[in-house]
Each structure stands twice: as structure tokens, then as C-alpha cells.
Image (cartoon, grey):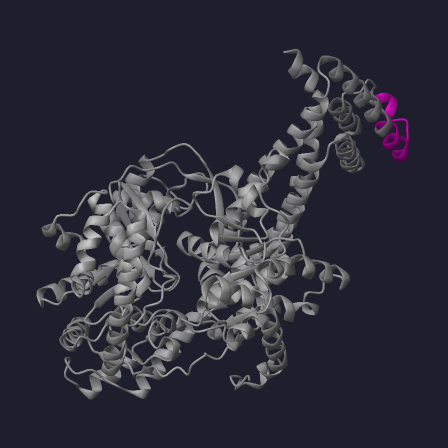
């Protein structure tokens, strides 16, 4: 019976869940062959129900529940079935860490792929996409559903095949870049994606909220100009903060003061720094941003003589990504690294508009409630909280606030020492590489063994192992942001993964030779040795069996049994200590990121504790908290080493976080509103491209362009004084044999009719001539010129739109709404671009004989 629905809003699904379980009972008796046949049976039913997925939901979910049991030996909880129903209704299912979101996604994915259209399950990184796809392959092999996987390493020819699968696992960035590349393809065979139908976004808040402030951009290389960046760097060293410029940390911007402008003009020996004919202002502002706002080991790292961005939300490095508008080059200049060429935007799209292209959209996360208004307003998705399978008994202790940062870190280090002494596993979340290394150094001095996980390459390679051991007794783990790590911290550890890791490490290090006794300590961790020592016979067998897969499998099963018993005992001991202890070292700009860190403990009804150690010098207090809190602390005259636990402080902090969230929501909303203007233009251009790409007969398109061109030029003819000159231009453009004098005697309709006729005659002659040269040449030329001119004009249009967005804000000083002004000007720019494309294509195609003759 179902007893897990405390909320009225989800009580209505109780009957559906009971029906799924009832149907599942009958499916248990099916043979594997009969279960596989369910897919074809459900497809037929769906056709009969006019593709209404709700009609077969109960049977489809029951089928996958059974497939999961047979493949993974796991029975889905009722709350997981509920999560699947919520996802099928285009909503966001908020499910806590460790509640099995990966399995929940399989339910609606299966149901919706039965329509014959592709389903995309979108993750935040390649590791998660690969891990989840491998799990899905096991499950869906029982129901004859093909699983695709697209990562950075998937080649173009393979991508097409993967997208054709029933369900495709993919990262958000690969999905976006493939969409843009498809709309830049010059042959229809190069298009890899199908039409967008249904997407389930894992970590939906990370993708649609955190990453929504940065558009996806495909860039082309322009010439390298390193001198202006180096000169701007030298100028930035001579400028002083608060004297020559002011820094706004909220908006990550720098503004030059009058003194700063004068000093720059004097150094550069120019009269006006803001003159549009020189570009110095861009270089100087970027150099100052690089100096003040973009910090090494926080915002980026340097590796192999390159500047590599660190994702502020996940703490991961972002290989291949570059900041735009010359900022990346300014940071390269700052770090004395070779300056790469500037990028020119060829195509771009925001994540908001990318995902709004889907007919159906759903998402999963552990933390979305704080942003539910944004999800509803922009994506039309409700956030529905799914109750946990077992009650969450985690204790979130009140924040400890110190007056200065030094005492905060000292207190955190002492807390880690105390936890190490009692062997309670502890996870410390930091906001930057720099802070994680600071704490690591402090613990080293205190002789506290610990693991460090941050974006530095030497630590990234050990990520899986570090997370695996973070729940073991006595482990102290320091990590930069935990969002999107994709691995649960299991108390006592995961027996299966630990055994696999031990065997893999032995195989890898020994290179399939026997392992010397004295080498074991260099290869395995202290815990792994401890577990192996419980059975000397197994240990000796393992040493001798490396290289023999069958023997290793036998040992694996024996070891697993031993590990399970030990881990079970260890988990009980940890729970008696209070479970995993999570320490936050700084409140994040968003409450969601804090909740993600807290959510690492107390999974599946386990005990756990979380606490934040803060200081008044933390960024959030400093930038958004104001001076009121500091004044209060000063008045109270409390010793700097004593932390403050105050409801007033906690409220002030929550208020500061809400201010930040509201501030960034406004930025995302503005980005969405501005991008929505170009998005409609983008759709029109991409639809035109697609039509041309898929067309085998582009002649009609050329004649249509020609007739529009005639009409547009005749509008100019009416308005102009020199009518003969305009007619002469039309005649020259269309390459027709006639004179302006003869045409000027006709009325407007007659001229239009005559020119349209002449266009067709002239084009027929052109076609005959080119067909004689080479059959099919005219069609190739048409397609080439059409796509070439559309792409070229669109790229120039994007540049103009970016410039327009930069200066349109100043219109607000003239009591004008910048967005309305932007829409109006964008419309005129778009119309001018369309006219330019048509006229250029007609000119090139009509004059192509001259090109060929040469």
C-alpha cells in the first residue's frame, strides 16, 4: 500500500502509483522474451490512442520497473514512480540527494520514446552522461530500446547515429553546440540532430539557472593582436583602485573615473579615450577586470601554458571554453602567456532559448524551490517537491559567524582535528581552489590526514576515489563546490566500487606482472590494505592473479563479501558518531548551492549534520550585507575568537542571499528578453537555411529573391529624384538587355511586370548556358550562393546586434525604454539584412557567367 504522500498537491497521483504496482505484479510472471515484446505492443497502443502518452503510462512504467528489477536487482520506491509521473507532465521533480533520480528518468524517457521521436536526457558533464547511459543500456536491453551517448569525444559521423537512438544521453553544452553546428552545415548529410521533442534535464537548476547567464557561442578565429593587450596591461598597473577607477563586484564591472580617463589619454597621447575610431577603452577595461575581478586559482587556472576557466558552480575546469570580447586575451597578457587570436561570433544561443525549442521539457534536481518563480515564468514548469523514501533526519546547525577570516579558518581547522580524533567522516566545502589549499596547508601543519578535491589536474584525476572514500571512518575531505559531482557519499563506503578500484589499481600499477610484497603500500590506500589484511589468503591470491580475468572475477566476488560485512559494521559505527559531518566555509550567492552541499549528508534516512562557518569578511557579507551587521558586532564588543550565533545575523544573511538571487534573476531575465528578440530572427534564418538545405530544386527560391529585389528597388525608384539611374541599377543587377529610357515611359505596375518577365527570361538563358558547361552546375551554384550569403550576413548581423545591446542602455537616460528601442532597431537591422542577402545572391548568380569565363 502507498503511505508516502504527505502533500495534497501530489495525493491525486496515489491511484496511479497503486495501478503501476498492480500491473508490475502481473509483469513479474513474464519471460524475458515476453517482457521485450511489451515495447512493440505499447507502440501499437500508443498509435491507437493518437499518441496520448498518458493512456499507456501505467503499463509503460510497470514495464520499466520490472526491467530495472531484472537488470539491477533494485525495486523502485513509490516516490520514484511519483517522480516519473511528475516528469512526464513537463514539471521539475525536486528529489533529494541519494533518492535515485537516475532511475526515475528512465520511466518517462521510455514512455515518450515510444512515440518514435527522440528523447534526450541532458546532464552537466561527460562523466555523468557516460555513467547514466551505461546503466540505462543494462535496463533497456530487456525492452529492446536503443541508448545513445554523445560526449566531447564522439566523432561527427557517430553523433548522427547516437542521436537516432530512442534515448540519447548528452551534456548541455554538446547539445547546444551541435544545434548551432547543424544550422551552419553546408550539406544536409552533415546534420546530426533530429527535431527536438522531449528532454529531461538532470541538475536542471545548474543548467537553466546557473549557466543561463552565459550564452553558447561558436567562434571563428580573427587575426592575433597581442600588442594592445600588453600595452593595456602595463597601463592597468599604473592605475590605482578608487583613484583612477572603481570596481563593482556585484556586476563584475570596472568604471574609469575622470582622473583615470585623463591619465589613460596622457599615456596613450590621444584626445578622447571614448572616440569610436580607437578601441583603447575595451582593452583597458578588460585589463582592469583581469587585474581586479578574475583571480588565479579561483576563476581560472594555468595549465600547459594556457588559461583554463574554472566553473564557479561545480569547481570543475572547462577545457576549450574561453571568455569572449577580449577578456580571455587580457588574462593571458596578465599571466604572461601566449595571447591567442580573438574570436568572432559565428553563431550563438542562450540555454533558455535552446531548451524552449523542445515540445516537452522536464527536469530533476535536489534544489529548485528557491527559483520556482523563474522556472514558471520563463520555462512554464512547476517545481514539485517529491517526499523522500525515508524521513530526512539531518541536523542543520545554526551558522557560526566570526568577526575576521583568520579566526574562522582557525576554527574550521580545529573542528576538523576534533572530528579526526573521534574518526567521524567530515566533508568541507570551499568556494575556490585558493581557499581549499589554505585549509589543506593548515591541516598538514596540524598533522591531520585528509584528501583534497579541486579543479587542479593532479586532484581531478583522483575525484572518483576521493568521493568513494569520503564516507569512510576517519576521512577528512576538502572539496570545491560539490554541485554536479554525480557521486553519492556512502557511509562506510561502497563495497562494489572499492573492490573494483583496488583490483584496477593493482592491474594498472603492476602492468600485468606479479606484485612485490613491498609495493602494495605504494599502490593501495590505508583503508584498502586494512580490508585486504582481513583475509591473507585472498590478498596472496590477488597478488598472483593480476592478468588473469577469470581468477580476478572469483577474487572480486570473495573480496566483495568481505568488504560488505566490514562496511556494514563501519557504517553502524559512523552513525553512532552522528553520520557524515558537512562544513560550509562560506555562504554562496545562491541558497541552492548551500543546500546542495548540505544535501551530501543525511541521504536515504541516514543521520548527518551540517554547519556553516562564516566571517564578516566573506564576499556575501562584504558585497551585499552592508555595514549594519558589522556595526552591530562592533557595538557588542565581542572577542574576535568567539563566534556569534544569532537569529538576527542568520536573517540578515538570508536576506543578503535573496538580494543576490534577485539581482542575478534580473540579469538572466534581461538576457532572456534581449535574446528572445534575436531568437525569433534566428529561427527565421535557420528555417530558411533548412528549407534551402533540404531542397533539391532551389530555382524557385532564386526567382522569389529576384522578384522581392525588384519590388524593393522599385520602392526606392518611387522615392528618388534620379529615376533613370535607379532603373539602370535594376537592369544591371538583373543582367537584362533593355534601356532605362524605354522603361521610364511605363507606369509602376507595367515596369514591375516587365522586369519580372525579363528576370525569368534572363535566368532561363543563364540556366541553359550553365547546364551546357556542366549538368547540375546551376543548382550547385544556387545552393552555394544562398547558404554563403545567409551565413555571412547573419554573422555580421550578430556583431551589429551585440554592439546595439552594448550602447542601447544609454537610451534610458533619455526617458526611453531600452528594450523597446532594442526591439525597434533590431527589426530594422533584420529587414536590412534580408534585403542585403536577396540583392547579393541575385547579383552573384546573375553575374556568375563572368566568374566562370575567367
The answer, for residue 718, to whether it is visible in the render is: yes
Q: Is residue 33 above or below residue 576?
A: above
Q: How many callouts does the rendering have?
A: 0
- Quadrant position of residue 842: top right
Magenta region's main secondary structure? Answer: helix
Instruction: Say whether residue 753 is magenta.
Output: yes
Image position of 468 (left or right of 785): left
Q: Position of residue 495 (x, y in %)?
A: 30, 65
Q: Nearer the viewer, residue 541 or 708?
A: 541
Kindly indicate the quadrant of the structure image that contains residue 108: bottom right
Residue displayed at 39% across by 82% down: 392
Would you place residue 386 above or below residue 663 in this image? below
Q: Which quarter of the rendered picture does the C terminus lie within?
A: top right
Residue 176: x percent and y percent?
A: 52, 49
Q: Quadrant of the N terminus?
A: bottom right
Residue 283 at what x, y percent from top left?
36, 44
Residue 811 in view here: no
User: Which residue is depicted at the point 77% across and 19% down?
Assistant: 766
Work out whether residue 47 or residue 648 is closer to the camera in this orientation and state it.
47
Residue 820, percent from left and from top: 62, 59
Would you say residue 821 sits in the magenta stretch? no
Position of 837 with respect to 352 (left or right) is: right
Q: Nearer the viewer, residue 242 or 806?
A: 806
Instruction: Check the image and report above or below for 732 versus 381.
Output: above
Residue at 52% in and 57% down: 121
Q: Quadrant of residue 99?
A: bottom left
Magenta highlight range: 741-755
Furthest toward the top, the residue is 854
Amino acid at each position: 500500500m502507498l503511505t508516502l504522500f504527505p502533500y495534497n498537491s501530489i495525493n491525486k497521483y496515489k491511484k496511479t502509483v497503486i495501478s503501476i504496482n498492480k500491473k508490475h505484479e502481473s509483469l513479474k510472471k513474464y519471460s524475458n522474451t515476453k517482457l521485450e515484446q511489451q515495447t512493440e505492443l505499447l507502440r501499437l497502443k500508443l498509435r491507437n490512442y493518437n499518441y496520448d502518452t498518458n493512456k499507456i503510462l501505467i503499463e509503460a512504467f510497470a514495464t520499466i520497473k520490472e526491467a530495472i528489477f531484472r537488470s539491477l536487482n533494485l525495486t523502485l520506491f513509490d516516490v520514484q514512480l511519483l517522480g516519473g509521473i511528475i516528469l512526464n507532465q513537463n514539471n521539475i521533480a525536486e528529489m533529494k540527494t541519494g533518492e535515485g533520480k537516475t532511475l526515475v528518468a528512465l520511466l518517462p524517457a521510455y514512455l515518450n520514446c515510444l512515440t518514435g521521436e527522440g528523447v534526450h536526457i541532458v546532464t552537466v558533464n561527460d562523466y555523468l552522461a557516460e555513467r547514466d547511459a551505461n546503466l540505462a543500456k543494462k535496463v533497456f536491453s530487456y525492452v529492446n530500446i536503443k541508448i545513445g551517448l554523445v560526449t566531447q569525444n564522439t566523432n561527427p559521423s557517430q553523433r548522427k547515429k547516437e542521436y537516432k537512438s530512442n534515448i540519447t544521453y548528452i551534456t548541455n553544452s554538446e547539445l547546444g553546440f551541435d544545434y548551432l553546428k547543424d544550422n551552419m552545415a553546408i550539406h544536409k548529410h552533415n546534420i546530426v540532430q533530429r527535431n527536438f521533442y522531449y528532454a529531461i534535464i538532470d541538475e536542471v537548476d545548474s543548467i537553466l539557472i546557473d549557466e543561463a547567464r552565459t550564452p553558447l557561442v561558436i567562434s571563428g578565429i580573427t587575426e592575433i593582436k597581442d600588442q594592445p593587450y600588453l600595452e593595456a596591461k602595463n597601463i592597468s598597473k599604473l592605475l590605482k583602485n578608487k583613484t583612477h577607477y572603481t570596481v563593482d563586484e556585484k556586476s563584475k564591472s570596472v568604471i574609469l573615473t575622470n582622473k583615470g580617463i585623463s591619465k589613460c589619454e596622457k599615456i596613450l597621447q590621444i584626445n578622447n579615450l571614448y572616440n569610436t575610431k580607437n578601441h583603447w577603452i575595451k582593452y583597458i577595461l578588460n585589463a582592469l577586470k583581469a587585474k581586479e575581478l578574475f583571480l588565479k586559482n579561483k576563476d581560472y587556472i594555468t595549465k600547459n601554458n594556457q588559461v583554463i576557466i574554472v566553473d564557479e558552480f561545480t569547481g570543475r575546469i572547462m577545457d576549450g571554453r574561453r571568455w569572449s570580447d577580449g577578456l580571455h586575451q587580457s588574462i593571458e597578457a596578465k599571466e604572461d602567456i601566449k595571447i591567442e587570436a580573438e574570436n568572432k561570433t559565428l553563431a550563438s544561443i542562450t540555454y533558455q532559448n535552446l531548451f524552449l525549442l523542445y515540445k516537452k521539457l522536464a527536469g530533476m534536481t535536489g534544489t529548485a524551490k528557491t527559483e520556482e518563480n523563474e522556472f514558471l515564468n520563463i520555462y512554464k514548469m512547476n517545481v514539485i517537491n517529491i517526499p523522500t523514501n525515508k524521513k530526512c533526519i539531518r541536523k542543520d546547525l545554526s551558522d557560526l559567524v566570526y568577526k575576521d577570516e583568520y579566526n574562522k579558518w582557525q576554527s574550521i581547522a580545529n573542528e576538523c582535528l576534533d572530528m579526526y580524533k573521534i574518526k567521524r567522516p567530515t566533508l568541507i566545502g570551499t568556494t575556490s581552489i585558493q581557499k581549499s589549499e589554505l585549509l589543506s596547508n593548515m591541516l598538514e601543519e596540524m598533522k591531520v590526514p585528509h584528501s583534497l578535491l579541486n579543479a587542479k589536474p593532479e586532484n581531478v584525476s583522483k575525484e572518483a576515489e576521493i568521493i568513494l572514500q569520503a564516507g569512510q571512518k576517519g576521512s577528512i575531505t576538502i572539496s570545491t563546490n560539490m554541485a554536479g559531482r554525480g557521486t553519492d557519499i556512502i557511509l562506510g563506503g561502497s563495497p562494489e566500487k572499492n573492490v573494483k578500484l583496488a583490483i584496477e589499481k593493482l592491474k594498472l600499477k603492476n602492468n600485468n606482472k606479479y606484485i612485490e610484497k613491498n609495493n602494495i603500500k605504494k599502490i593501495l590506500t590505508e583503508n584498502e590494505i586494512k580490508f585486504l589484511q582481513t583475509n591473507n589468503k585472498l590478498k596472496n591470491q590477488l597478488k598472483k592473479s593480476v592478468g588473469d580475468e577469470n581468477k580476478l572475477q572469483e577474487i572480486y566476488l570473495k573480496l566483495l563479501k568481505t568488504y560488505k560485512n566490514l562496511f556494514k559494521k563501519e557504517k553502524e559505527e559512523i552513525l553512532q558518531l552522528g553520520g557524515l559531518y558537512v562544513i560550509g566555509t562560506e555562504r554562496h550567492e545562491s541558497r541552492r548551492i548551500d543546500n546542495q552541499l548540505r544535501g551530501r549528508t543525511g541521504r536515504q534516512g541516514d543521520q548527518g549534520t551540517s554547519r556553516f562557518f562564516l566571517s564578516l569578511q566573506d564576499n556575501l557579507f562584504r558585497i551585499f550585507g552592508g555595514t549594519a551587521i558589522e556595526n552591530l558586532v562592533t557595538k557588542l564588543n565581542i572577542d574576535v575568537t568567539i563566534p556569534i550565533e544569532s537569529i538576527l545575523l542568520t536573517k540578515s544573511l538570508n536576506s543578503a542571499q535573496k538580494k543576490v538571487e534577485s539581482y542575478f534573476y534580473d540579469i538572466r531575465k534581461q538576457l532572456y528578453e534581449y535574446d528572445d528578440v534575436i531568437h525569433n530572427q534566428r529561427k527565421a534564418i535557420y528555417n530558411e537555411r533548412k528549407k534551402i538545405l533540404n531542397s533539391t530544386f532551389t530555382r524557385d527560391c532564386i526567382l522569389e529573391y529576384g522578384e522581392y529585389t525588384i519590388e524593393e528597388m522599385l520602392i526606392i525608384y518611387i522615392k528618388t529624384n534620379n529615376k533613370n539611374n535607379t532603373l539602370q541599377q535594376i537592369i544591371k543587377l538583373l543582367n537584362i538587355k533593355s534601356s532605362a529610357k524605354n522603361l521610364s515611359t511605363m507606369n509602376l505596375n507595367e515596369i514591375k511586370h516587365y522586369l519580372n518577365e525579363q528576370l525569368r527570361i534572363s535566368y532561363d538563358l543563364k540556366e541553359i548556358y550553365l547546364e551546357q558547361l556542366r549538368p547540375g552546375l546551376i543548382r550547385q551554384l544556387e545552393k552555394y550562393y544562398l547558404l554563403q550569403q545567409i551565413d555571412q550576413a547573419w554573422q555580421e548581423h550578430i556583431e551589429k546586434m551585440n554592439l546595439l545591446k552594448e550602447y542601447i542602455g544609454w537610451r534610458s537616460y533619455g526617458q526611453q525604454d531600452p528594450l523597446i528601442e532594442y526591439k525597434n532597431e533590431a527589426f530594422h537591422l533584420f529587414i536590412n539584412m534580408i534585403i542585403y542577402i536577396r540583392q547579393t545572391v541575385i547579383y552573384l548568380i546573375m553575374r556568375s557567367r563572368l566568374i566562370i569565363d575567367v
